[in-house]
Amino acid sequence: MEGLGLATIMDLVGSGWQLLLEPIHRTPWRDWRGFWLGDVLDDRFVVVYFLPLLPVLLLAPFRRLRLAIVLTGLSFLAYVVGLLYAGLWLLTCVVFYRVGERFAVECRRTDVWPMGPPLAAIAIIGGWYAATMALHELRLPPAWNDWLFRHAPWIFPLGARGLRWEPCFYRLHDSFAPGRPFPLLHAMFANVHNIGTAYLAARMLHYFSELKRHALPQPRRSLLNFLAYTCYAPTLIQGPIERFGPFQDEMDTCHQRRRWRNLPAGLARIGLGLGKSLIVTWYFHPLLGRKLGLGGPDTFWKHPEQIQSFTLLYLGGFLIIFTLYLEFSGYCDVAAGMARLLGYRQVENFARPWLATSLREFWRRWHISLTSILRDYVYIPLGGNRRRALFNVCFTFLVCGLWHRLVLQVAIWGLLMGLMVGINQAWARWMKRLDQAPSGMLPTLRRWSLRCQPLPRILAWLITQHAFVFSLLVFFGGGGAVNVVREIVRRAWILATSLGG
């Protein structure tokens, strides 16, 4: 019996290893365009295309570093998102700089309504960001689009140009008009979170807020400093969101931190990020595509009853979010590795969020640069937890949701997440009061539960992770989240009744 049990265990281990190794064995390693460019280095990992320009920054003398950052950043944009977009980006940054300088003057005036300049700045930044989202739906006349593609293909984004050495990121172009080029504006503004505009909006929220506080001295606010801040390529398209002052400090001192020993550490960090992309390509995309029907028939959202495995149905939300985490944190790893080579200490964007045991703690570990921006420039100015705490946290997460997409389902997610974080805050305050109470039934129960560790901590961890993941079903699936939750509850009820019977 012992031998049979050991053999069974060894068979299970062998089967597990076979499942892990099979995708690797089937990998078309030599397929540069289809596998490497099309699957591994797509979407977020397009930042890898900046690597050939990195030596320019490494070799640039101290006095020319910021100019090199601007030129390489615009060159990167011109190749990846198109020459037209690079020109628009430069124009946008110059306009924001001029508006910021005027804003700094207006904030010092005593003869204007104090809220006037901030409201005008919010309207300009928010209106520009909404316009970039709307441009995605704008179509040029087909004849114009065709003429531009024939005579000026480099104004089209990467992958829409159809060159042999470039990946085809826009794989749905044939659904518009077979044999015709992808619509220019639709391609340029396909996703504001992949082309830098979302993160530029968040940076401007920080920058203008610091101008309002008179925290940025005029000598630091040169046009070149500002353009370097907005054109630093590794973090340009998808963050992390640096702050203006610390970024300039890092640029002033990064030459002093460049060492040969940074090379293996930086390359290892880049390799870690690309490894996460490989994991997603090998294991997660097949599950999301073939098993959950995402990216195709959307079985997971529209017809969850067709997913035979209850385990897969239940874990579907976790698979979606963990895929997002691997891709996003992997991109941040690549950007951090490049920064390490430059001697630039980039802000970290993730700090093991899957270990969080409360939603408050989770948001201190997840997308740290964004949540700290929203905390400092939205939540605290509204009053923080001093007054109207629930309203403030709900409004802050509403802004967070709308920053991702201007759609109802994301706004609902923001309010829902804000409500859950508000409840979490109230619970934490209540627990603190119970800890300080000398006696009573509830304080006694509280102290007894603390002696039962680690069970309370495990329970808090389970509640936190489920609250975060299941709230994001609304974020990604909208009304389809109702279908998924209903099917999960239905099957769980059937399973419970069958076990009880």
Image (cartoon, grey):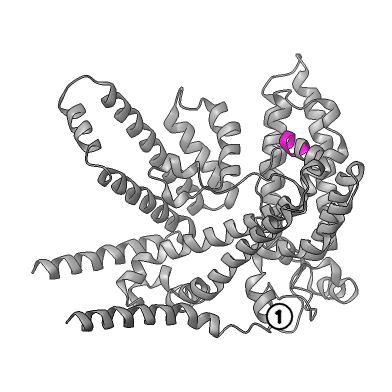
Instruction: Kindly identify the residue that appears in the image at 66 percent across and 69 percent down.
Output: 42
Q: Quadrant of the N terminus?
A: bottom left
Residue 359: image x %, image y %? 41, 43
Q: Residue at the location (47% across, 60% down)?
A: 321
Horizontally, residue 121 falls left or right of residue 391, namely: right
Q: Mark yes or no: residue 134 visible.
A: no
Query: Residue 38: where, in percent of width, then height?
Result: 66, 76
Kind of residue at badge 1: Trp
Residue 246, magenta (yes or no): yes
Residue at left offset 84%, top offset 39%: 225
Question: Can you tell which quarter of the image residue 479 is in?
Answer: bottom left
Q: Tell whether 341 sits left or right of 13.
A: right
Q: Outermost residue, left direction? A: 501
Q: Quadrant of the C terminus?
A: bottom left
Mark 1 nearby-residue class (10 Å; few <14, some 14–19, many ≥20): some
Q: Nearer the viewer, residue 435 or 302?
A: 435
Q: Residue at x 33, y 74 (%)?
A: 305
Look at the image and say whether residue 325 sits in the magenta stretch. no
Q: Secondary structure at mark 1?
A: helix
Q: Which residue is mark 1?
A: 32
Q: Which residue is nearer to you in this view: 127 or 64?
A: 64
Q: Provide the major secondary structure of the magenta segment.
A: helix
Residue 380 drawn at (x, y percent)? 54, 28
Q: Nearer the viewer, residue 10 or 241?
A: 10
Give the answer, above or below, for where 75 lies relative to 208.
below
Residue 442 percent across, percent down from the top left? 19, 29
Stretch in magenta: 244-248
Single out the residue that lies furthest toward the top: 110
As drawn, 12 above or below 393: below
Please state if 124 lies on the left or on the right of 473 as rendered.
right
